[in-house]
Amino acid sequence: MRRYPSPYAASYSSFGPGPLSQALKVLIAANVAAFIATTMMPGLILWLGLIPAAVLQQFQVWQLGTYMFLHGGVFHILFNMLALWMFGTELERLWGTREFLKFYFVCGIGAGVLTILFSMMPFGVSRQVYESVVIGASGAIYGLLLAYALTYPERPILLIVFFVPAKVCVAILGAIALLSSMSERGGVANATHLGGLVVAYIYLKGRRTHPMAELKYRYLKWKINRVRKKFDVYSGGRADDWDRRVH
């Protein structure tokens, strides 16, 4: 009996998306350096971590950018950096380094802003966030996860013990973050996770529908067609038109 290769075979046969790019090396190195620094000097967390009360009352706005480089333990930074490599590598190849870094920081900082807005809501679960210290790159990581799922919706991802399509994985993680953010115990971290998903969705939605982006796409398509006509290039042809076919 003839066997046909599975479309997911490549995903199982090799581990990871490939070597680290220069941008990912810098991001991971910055996170590791910050982790070592805060391990040696724990007091830095109160200055660099995101405390909504400190941002609103003392204008410590730098915390919106610095909190995403801090982590609370070895497993915290390990899993975040692993996710950054696993999902960020292909997105950077697709978008380019500049657009990738822009998206990463927009998601991270945007998640911090939404966390502050959440902490100002008149609910018990949100009041605990107001004076809590929020740390971790999870807001940006969740943004990358959503972008990956929208780009490769059917790509299998290992969720605990089962492989599920990327779109299903993100839907499950988003639902967990939403429900957890409504609880007293999980509100702090998961509000930021959910914020990363929301910011990523808004950013990607605006990026796809931006009028300038659409104009650039139409212009590029027109230029390609013009070059093809100029050099008499065809992508196919009739079976007997072999001399005009380009492969």
Image (cartoon, rainbow, N blue to C red):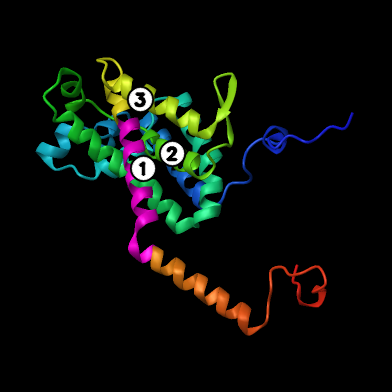
Spatial CA span between label 1 and label 3? 15 Å
Identify the mark at residue 60; answer none if there is no mark. Answer: none
In the image, residue 197 lies in the stretch drawn in magenta: yes
Q: Amino acid at mark 1?
A: Tyr
Q: Which residues are magenta?
A: 192-213
Spatial CA span between label 3 and label 2? 13 Å
**Are the two marked residues, 2 and 1, in contact with CB atoms closer than 8 angstroms?**
yes
Q: Amino acid at mark 3?
A: Ala
Decide which of tag 1 and tag 3 comes sooner along the chain.
Answer: 3
Q: Where does label 3 land, which residue?
A: 177
Which residue is found at the position 45% from the left and 52% from the top?
Answer: 100
Please name the predominant secondary structure of the magenta segment in the image: helix
Q: Where does label 2 land, which residue?
A: 146
- Disc 2 secondary structure class: helix
Q: Where does label 1 land, which residue?
A: 201
Q: Quadrant of the N terminus?
A: top right
Q: Amino acid at mark 2?
A: Leu
